[in-house]
């Protein structure tokens, strides 16, 4: 093995994160999925009782505010320099307030009981709460994205943490809230349980929120940022320059933009209103659970054997083929209404889908961190928050429009709110099936094109991380012995790209 290869292996395989922090990292990942967010639409439409069209218009206004505040808050985060790091102050400060705001969200049915869908005080409350939650959430979401890319400078360790987190959290029960909600939903609808939906949502929503808040806070209190930031705070102009030079980010943004034109409804609505069971998804996924676990064993082999581009393209097309087959089988003789038949078909789809769990949850998830490192490699400094905000700017504008479109789709296909399970019209049932299978595959197919152009191959990736490691060590050495005048010169050269070989 050559000296360069040994140095590369030593860097990519080095561990910076200890056992305590690793456990906290896993529990933070667990907290991200420990919620009942899959049922928020049912909560707003059937329990709180807000009209589809009004919900769509409220979504437009809160979405526009989200787009506006992203740009300002990202610059603030990227210009932050504290003894606790660049991102941690925002994450820790907003964690408990966001949990309290979520509690106010789940309390809506009790604050406005038995009110009609157009009751003005309820709509004002819903809109105001959405704006406040969005504002506080922007700081934490931008900061969290940047923070996770700085937890360790070693790409090998980062992949290991992702793999451990995704592998273990499933066994810890991260999906338990959604599983319980699906079971309770069916039991209440069938009259077996005489619980009220508003109390169920309050208990589950607040309970999961408190647990998630505690676990997330634990991680961000015991962990730290380990990737060096620029000495001086980058200006807005320098932040924009870094984004323009980041070709992989531009491609990811374009792919996401084209994919955001995908029109769909959630699968749970099809399960409940057509197949008549919210818990059917639990039964469908149970047999293939171990397959997802086994798929993680192939992550190191896939990383060595294939480029990020090829795995990204494969994952996209593989998913579209699976759901096209599901649609064709359901369409044949109107089998989409047959619970047993579709249960088997969806179970087979879940089996083949979980074969790529390791690929999607580790390798492709790490792409976000990879493009942040690419920014530093090309420009000499990092602007994680500004990059994330810019990447999301166009997507959120598009999302505002498409989110409203999705709400209006329910109205146009004849979906009736608060109607008994299984009593929607035949036309509505067909469209609920099509909108969660074939329609999103066709309307989002253009998103695969930019994936063919992703430039970071195995050779470039290895070179990038090797050079980044050498550059960071050199800068740290020079900073530690520099005078105040030399430090000023060094910081200026860093932001001008003068330290790039």
Image: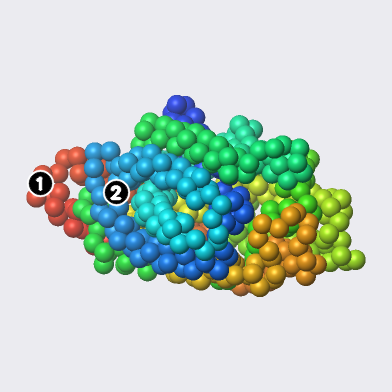
Where's the C terminus, which quadrant?
Answer: bottom left
Q: Is residue 258 visible?
A: yes
Is 282 situated left or right of 99 in this image?
A: right
- Which residue is the site of mark 1? 484
Q: Kindly identify the residue that appears in the image at 26 percent across and 64 percent down.
A: 236
* 333 on left or right of 481: right
Residue carrying label 2: 229
**Display coloring:** rainbow
Q: Position of residue 31 (x, y in %)?
A: 51, 38
**Left of 172 or right of it: where is 129?**
left
Which residue is at the front of the view, 184 or 8? 184
Work out which residue is located at the far top of the displayed protein and give it: 20
The answer to whether residue 206 is above or below residue 62 is: above
Q: Position of residue 14 (x, y in %)?
A: 45, 36
Q: The residue tagged with tag 1: helix, strand or loop?
A: helix
- Is residue 255 visible to us here? no
- In percent of width and height, residue 102 lies at 45, 45
Q: 45 above or below 226?
A: below
Earlier sequence position, callout 1 versus callout 2:
2
Disc 2 on helix, strand or loop? loop
Separation of marks 1 and 2 at Cα, in angstroms: 18 Å
Q: Residues within 10 Å of mark 2 (few under 14, many from 20)?
A: many
**Residue 93 left/right relative to 193:** left
Residue at x 56%, y 48% (from the top left corner): 37
């Amino acid at each position: 093995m050559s000296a360069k290869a040994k140095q590369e292996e030593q860097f990519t395989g080095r561990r910076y994160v200890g056992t305590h922090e690793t456990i906290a990292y896993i529990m933070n990942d667990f907290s991200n999925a420990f919620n009942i967010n899959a049922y928020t639409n049912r909560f707003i439409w059937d329990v709180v009782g807000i009209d589809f069209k009004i919900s769509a218009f409220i979504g437009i206004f809160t979405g526009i505010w989200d787009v506006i505040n992203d740009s300002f808050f990202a610059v603030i985060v990227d210009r932050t320099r504290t003894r606790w790091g660049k991102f941690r102050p925002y994450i820790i400060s907003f964690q408990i307030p966001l949990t309290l705001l979520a509690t106010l969200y789940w309390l809506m049915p009790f604050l406005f009981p038995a009110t009609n869908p157009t009751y003005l005080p309820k709509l004002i409350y819903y809109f105001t709460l959405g704006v406040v939650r969005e504002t506080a959430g922007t700081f934490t979401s931008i900061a969290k994205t940047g923070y996770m890319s700085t937890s360790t400078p070693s790409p090998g360790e980062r992949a290991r943490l992702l793999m451990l987190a995704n592998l273990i959290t499933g066994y810890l029960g991260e999906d338990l809230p959604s599983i319980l909600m699906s079971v309770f939903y069916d039991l209440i609808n069938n009259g077996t349980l005489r619980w009220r939906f508003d109390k169920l949502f309050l208990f589950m929503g607040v309970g999961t929120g408190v647990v998630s808040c505690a676990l997330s806070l634990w991680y961000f209190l015991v962990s730290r940022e380990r990737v060096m930031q620029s000495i001086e705070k980058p200006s807005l102009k320098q932040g924009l320059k870094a984004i323009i030079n980041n070709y992989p980010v531009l491609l990811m943004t374009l792919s996401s933009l084209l994919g955001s034109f995908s029109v769909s409804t959630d699968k749970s609505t099809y399960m409940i209103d057509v197949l008549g069971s919210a818990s059917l998804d639990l039964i469908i996924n149970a047999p293939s659970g171990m397959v997802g676990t086994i798929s993680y064993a192939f992550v190191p082999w896939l990383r060595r054997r294939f480029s990020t581009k090829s795995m990204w393209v494969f994952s996209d097309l593989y998913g579209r083929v699976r759901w096209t087959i599901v649609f064709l089988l359901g369409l044949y003789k109107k089998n989409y209404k047959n619970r047993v038949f579709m249960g088997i078909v969806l179970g087979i789809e879940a089996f083949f889908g979980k074969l790529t769990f390791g690929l999607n949850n580790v390798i492709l998830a790490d792409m976000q961190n990879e493009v942040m490192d690419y920014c530093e490699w090309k420009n000499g400094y990092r602007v994680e928050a500004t990059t994330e905000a810019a990447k999301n700017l166009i997507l959120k504008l598009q999302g505002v429009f498409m989110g409203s479109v999705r709400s209006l789709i329910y109205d146009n296909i004849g979906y009736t709110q608060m109607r008994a399970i299984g009593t929607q019209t035949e036309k509505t049932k067909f469209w609920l099936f099509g909108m969660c299978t074939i329609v999103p595959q066709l309307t989002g197919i253009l998103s695969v094109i930019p994936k063919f152009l992703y430039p970071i191959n195995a050779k470039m990736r290895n070179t990038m991380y090797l050079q980044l490691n050498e550059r960071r060590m050199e800068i740290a050495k020079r900073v530690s012995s520099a005078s105040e005048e030399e430090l000023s010169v060094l910081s200026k050269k860093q932001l001008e790209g003068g330290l790039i070989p």
